[in-house]
Image: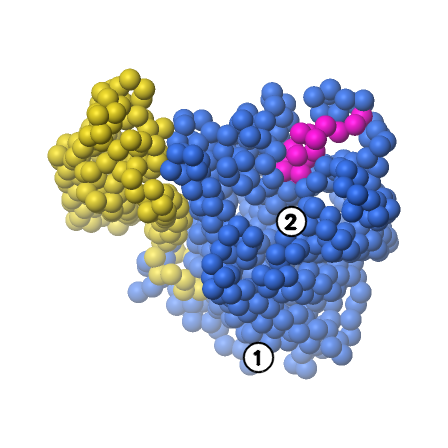
Chain colours: A blue, B yellow
Amino acid sequence: MATTALPLEKTTHATHEMSFVRKYIFSTDHKIIGIQFLLMSFVFLLFGGLMAMMMRWQLGFPDQPLPAGQLLPETMAPGGFLLPEFYNSLVTMHGTIMVFFAIMPLLVGVFGNFLIPLKIGAPDMAFPRLNMASFWIALTAGILIMAGFFVEGGAAGAGWTSYAPLSASPEWTGVVGGQQLWLVSLAVVGLASILGATNYITTVVNLRAPGMTWFRLPLSIWALFVTAILVLLAIPILSGAAIMLFFDQTIGTHFFDPTDGGQPLMWQHLFWYFGHPEVYILILPAMGFVSDIIANASRKPVFGYHSMVYALISIAFLGWIVWGHHMFMSGMNPTLGMAFMMSTMIIAVPSAIKVFNWMGTMWRGNIMFHVPMLHSVAFVSMFVIGGLSGVFMASPPVDIYFHDTYFIVAHLHYVLFGGSLFAIFGAVTFWYPKMFGKLMNPLLGKIHFWLTFVFYNLTFFPMHNLGVGGHMRRIYDPSQYEFLQPLAPLNTFITVSALLLFAAQIPFAVNFIMSWFNGEEAGENPWNDNGLEWIVPSPAPHGNFAEVPIVYRGPYEFSSPLVEEDFLPQTRKLDSDTEPAAASAAE
Amino acid sequence: MAHPAMMHPPARREIGADVYNEKLGIWIFLGSEVMFFTALIGAYIIVRFGSPEFWALPNQILNVPVTAINTFLLICSSVTMVKAFASIQDGDQKKLQLYMVATVIIGAAFVGVQAYEYTTLVHEGFLPSGYAAGSHLAELAARGELPASVSVYGSSFYTMTGFHGFHVSMGVVCMVFVTWKAFKGKYTKEDHRGVEVIGLYWHFVDLVWIILFTIVYLV
């Protein structure tokens, strides 16, 4: 009998009073851990953003000292002018921090933790203590990587991809401790991700409430589940590669050293075999959140729910067989390049299914343009631009020309900022009431959205033009080449836009903090949504549900003719509904 | 004493994987471990095919008989682990304790033999970076009896077996904890999840070693 093999509920949710430390610092509550990840990632997002501002200043105004640059030590910016070595560190650390300590924890760490148990009707994660461990391990890794700036030789400087042999020996990068801290930090944060993924997968498989069948799961949970599988299988490849590179630097192994039998190209293969699934780790959860928000704001069921799920799964699968498109210029058999080109372009098919389904969801809907919806629509449109340039670059003849230029930088930011980060802003605004019990201010939210949207496009769209003009991706001083000098005004324009984009985040920060203290009380269900998280008080209490919820339908029953209201919660029992088998089995 | 969870009726749930969380969790985690060892073994395959002249013949540098005995030890520890699990399935506390202690001792012995092997190899001049200058092995190489350089051989040997040894050591630490709980009578015929979970991990580590022993020592 199935129920006897099933677990064995833990009794950690007794209603005893806990100390402040147990409740908010070393908490095992998935919601607190999610909020801890949120605060941590915002701090790293700020660090990464500041690094980007310094780089932009150098590119836009190479002959003027960085404002307040005198505060930086002589080893970084003497007289306020960035040193080339420091610029290399900024390039490297901006990429690494944003990918591993801002976007990835925001998508997976914050919402994986916060949403999965609430949306599937579980009291907590399957392994709450493991969950706590993964937050503290991730924070340790973040501190380790930032420590690179304070050791002799500066922070890692071989790019976020850390290609060997450049990265394999301190003689070549000029960076000693920083590069090693970078590798150790990635291996450590990898452990946190693997523990988290184990937890998410177990929770989704085993802890769904009665009636919450696989095809009644919200798309956000489907996306997080598929992402967790990618994390589980991709991250250990990076850990293995990072460990080998670490040994090359410290105990004298020769994995990536061509002078003594090693293979530098092997690093690229290992890195991108992890790296391309990583690209989808950074976008699939965003797609899930956006699907939830668009259905809610359009007051319509998601168009093609099943095809959305199958598209997620096929993107995740195809993501494993395309890594070679990062290496067209590394020396590759043309036939192999062709195969990688084809597999890459095929990803456009499930991606297009998703885009058309989002548009189909909005089509003739009674759309409410609340702030999460604005961000979600921005996500869809920006993802189309980033996705199309991706299909374009997947072709080797095009990539040979655009490789390592600002065209790549533009493409990357269209999917990572225009895609992931807009979805994150949308998701934070949408679930903020359930996290803190307050609504974010809609006026500040709209100001933040429009300023961000405008300056984001003014910053990153012209980078396509820079790239077509041959502007190299990680170059410190473009003015040293005559052919790049006509692009200098464009660089200045981008820098001004980027500074304004950075400033446009102030309304968001103010809104986030002010609403926490004096926001409008949210009530249980401020968006009139159907998900299970909206039937509990805001903020959601410890243990989530007073009694095990029973699910009768999918999450997108908006404007149903069966009820008066235009939404129909998953737990509401209509006369025509029958009890799910799992609910009656244990009676 | 029964697990506290046993005193409560099982929660009503949608039917998931039909196994308890810890067992599902360790299977998922082992999937991740497979990918980790795949990275190391994949790197070994690439450098070995890329630079075959860096590899010595089996038995020239590595001591295959000693490691073969060690392999036998590790397989024996898997057998005692199975016996421990079978004992508690029958509710036999005494035999559980006996076989857990045996598994811990044999597992620790494996790590001990590996430490002895490493010490001997380093003493003879086989390092992760290749030959130690002026060592016995370096002299043999200079006389043409060994490959001129074994740098990537050393790199992949120490990395792969080292990480396996690290996994065995972690397993022993966890098994000490399980054994301690076994002596306190925490496992019962009905609820012995800890024994099963550590057992699955232990068999995985054993399986990885059989692959590593074959590709590192025998071919």
Q: Position of residue B113 (x, y in %)?
A: 20, 28
Residue at 78% x, 61% y: name it: A374
Mark 2 and mark 1: span between their CA atoms?
62 Å
- Boundaries of the magenta span: A80-94
Callout 2: residue from which chain? A
- Which quadrant: the N terminus of chain A? bottom left
Provide the major secondary structure of the magenta segment. helix
Instruction: Judge from the rendering whether residue A483 lies leftward or rightward of residue B33; answer left or right.
Output: right
Chain letter behind tag 1: A
For label 2, the SS is loop
Above or below for B160 versus A323: above
Is residue B98 depicted above or below A128 in this figure? above
Disc on res. A465: none
Q: Amino acid at mark 2?
A: Asp
Quadrant of the rendered structure where residue A426 is? bottom right
The x and y percentages for residue B12 are 44, 61
Q: Residues within 10 Å of mark 2 (few under 14, many from 20)?
A: some
Mark 1 = which residue? A575
Which callout, 2 or 1, points to the residue nearer the camera?
Answer: 2
For this rendering, which residue is in front, A467 or B183?
A: A467
Q: Which residue lies under the disc numbered 2?
A: A404
Tag 1's secondary structure?
loop
Q: Residue at x 23, y 36 (%)?
A: B56
Residue B87, given in percent of the width and then of the height, sits at 16, 45
How packed mark 1 is, by other alpha carbons closer than 10 Å (few <14, some 14-19, many 20 or more), is few
